[in-house]
């Protein structure tokens, strides 16, 4: 049996692309759980405004939206209001139910990837709460695991350097980040990763 017909996943490392994203928020949790019970708004020019119950991520943030009917996906926030954010998306009328929608920073490129570095910065020392990097395994939820956890009590930053480690993930995997941020510190998160072809079919 050759590797191409076995359950072993082969990767083509000849075509590697280095990627990064960042996101930030002036206060509050690293994820937004539940949107406002309101409608998506056609903002014109291919833009859609999404209502929130809390302070949104800052403009320029890369986020993932899930739990909606029409707007699940990855976006870069183009503008923010007091309780909404605007992204490029095809407009479809939808009234959000304010229950079960999640907005969070997440790596999910849809191809095999490797995480190189994660950097979290708070504008003041954190509370007795963990910043966590969590794998949502694409093959089975039984394989979900916390990859890194750091109590931010008394800290303003945490850097995870995996550049010398073989932190490889499958194309169906995704990685997300959590921090409760009860003290409402302003925070910024930057993630460096690499994507490459996998030649399994």
Image (cartoon, rainbow, N blue to C red):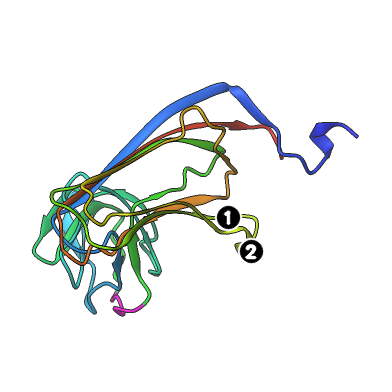
At horizontal 13% and vertical 48% (from top left) the residue drawn is 123
User: x and y percent of residue 76 in the render?
Assistant: 27, 46
Can residue 121 be seen here?
Answer: no
Which residue is denoted by mark 1 in the rendering?
137
Residue extending farthest right: 1
Q: Quick one: SS at disc 1? A: loop
Are the two marked residues, 1 and 2, in contact with CB atoms closer than 8 angstroms?
A: yes
Please say if 72 is above or below 198: below
Q: State the image coordinates of residue 12 (x, y, percent, origin top left).
A: 64, 26
Residue 48 located left or right of residue 146: left
Visible residue check, residue 191 = yes
Residue topped by disc 2: 142
Q: Residue at x 34, y 52 (%)?
A: 105
The residue lying at 35 percent from left, 66 percent from top is 102
Measured from the top left, where is residue 186 in percent x and y?
15, 53
Instruction: Say which of 52 and 104 sits in front.
Output: 104
89 on left or right of 51 = right
Q: Residues within 10 Å of mark 1 (few under 14, many from 20)?
A: some
In the image, residue 110 sits, relative to residue 85, either above or below, namely above
Which quadrant of the structure image shows residue 1? Answer: top right
Sequence-first disc among 1 and 2: 1
Magenta segment: does it hold 98? yes
**Span shown in magenta:** 95-99
Image coordinates of residue 82 in percent, x first then y, are 8, 64
Q: Gap in Å between the C-alphas at discs 1 and 2? A: 8 Å
- Structural crowding at the residue carrying mark 2, measured as other residues with C-alpha within 10 Å and reported as few (<14), some (14–19) or many (≥20): few
Residue at image position (46%, 51%) is 175
């Amino acid at each position: 049996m050759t590797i191409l017909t076995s359950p072993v996943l082969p990767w083509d490392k000849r075509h590697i692309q280095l990627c990064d994203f960042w996101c930030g928020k002036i206060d509050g949790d690293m994820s937004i759980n539940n949107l406002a019970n309101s409608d998506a708004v056609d903002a014109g020019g291919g833009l859609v405004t999404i209502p929130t119950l809390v302070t949104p991520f800052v403009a320029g943030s890369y986020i993932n939206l899930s739990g909606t009917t029409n707007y699940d996906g990855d976006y870069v926030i183009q503008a923010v209001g007091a309780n909404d954010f605007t992204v490029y998306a095809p407009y479809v009328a939808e009234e959000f139910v304010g229950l079960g929608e999640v907005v969070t920073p997440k790596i999910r490129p849809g191809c095999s990837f490797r995480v190189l570095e994660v950097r979290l910065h708070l504008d003041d020392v954190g509370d007795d709460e963990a910043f966590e990097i969590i794998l949502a395994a694409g093959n089975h939820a039984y394989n979900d695991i916390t990859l890194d956890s750091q109590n931010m009590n008394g800290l303003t930053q945490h850097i995870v350097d995996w550049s010398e480690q073989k932190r490889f993930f499958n194309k169906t995997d995704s990685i997300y980040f959590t921090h409760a941020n009860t003290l409402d510190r302003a925070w910024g998160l930057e993630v460096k990763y690499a994507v490459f072809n996998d030649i399994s079919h």
